[in-house]
Image: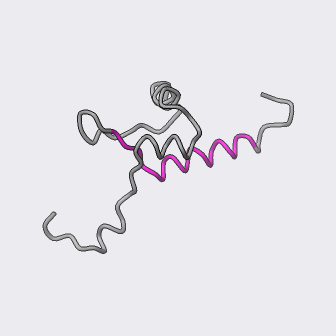
Amino acid sequence: MAGTTQHDHQHLPALLRIPDVRRLTGLSNSAIYRAVQYGTFPRHLKLSERSSAWVEAEIREWITARIAERDNTPRGAA
């Protein structure tokens, strides 16, 4: 990448591979991919034919939204 500096790389979003996404969310591979299909989980990026990654900030936003959803649901509901 001609013309980039180390400073430029500090602004790139971090990418997470599936083991990291599983660790952060507690979801299985199949649950993650199913939720992506249903549109209820952030979409992954294809890095290569057999490799995918998720944007870390999007995964953390998803987790934060689940917590907010829980906190805004009356007890006994759900």
Asked whether residue 60 is drawn in magenta, I would say yes
Left or right of residue 71, residue 44 in this image = left
Quarter of image, res 65: top right
For the point 30% across and 38% down, the residue is 51
Q: Against 73, is 59 above or below?
A: below
Instruction: Check the picture and name the quadrant holding the C terminus.
Output: top right
Q: Is residue 59 magenta?
A: yes
Q: Residue at x 70, y 41 (%)?
A: 69
**Quarter holding the N terminus?**
bottom left
Residue 58 vs residue 22, the one in the foreground: 22
Residue 40 rendering spot, x and y as whole percentages: 53, 32
Is the image coloured rainbow, by chain, by secondary structure, or in one colour? one colour
Q: Main structural element of the magenta stretch: helix, strand or loop? A: helix
In the rendered image, residue 70, in percent from the top left (x then y), is placed at: 73, 40
Q: Position of residue 73 (x, y in %)?
A: 78, 37
Which residue lies most toward the left here?
A: 2
Q: Within the image, what quadrant is residue 13 found in? A: bottom left
Residue at 59%, 39% in the rendered image: 26
Toward the viewer: 20 or 58?
20
Residue at 45%, 25% in the rendered image: 37
Residue 64, x across and y down, in percent: 62, 49
With 30 as the anchor, is 9 left or right in this view?
A: left
Q: How many marks?
A: 0
Please determine whether, in this image, residue 47 is positioned above or below residue 14: above
Specify whether 6 is left or right of 37. Answer: left
Part of the protein shown in magenta: 52-70
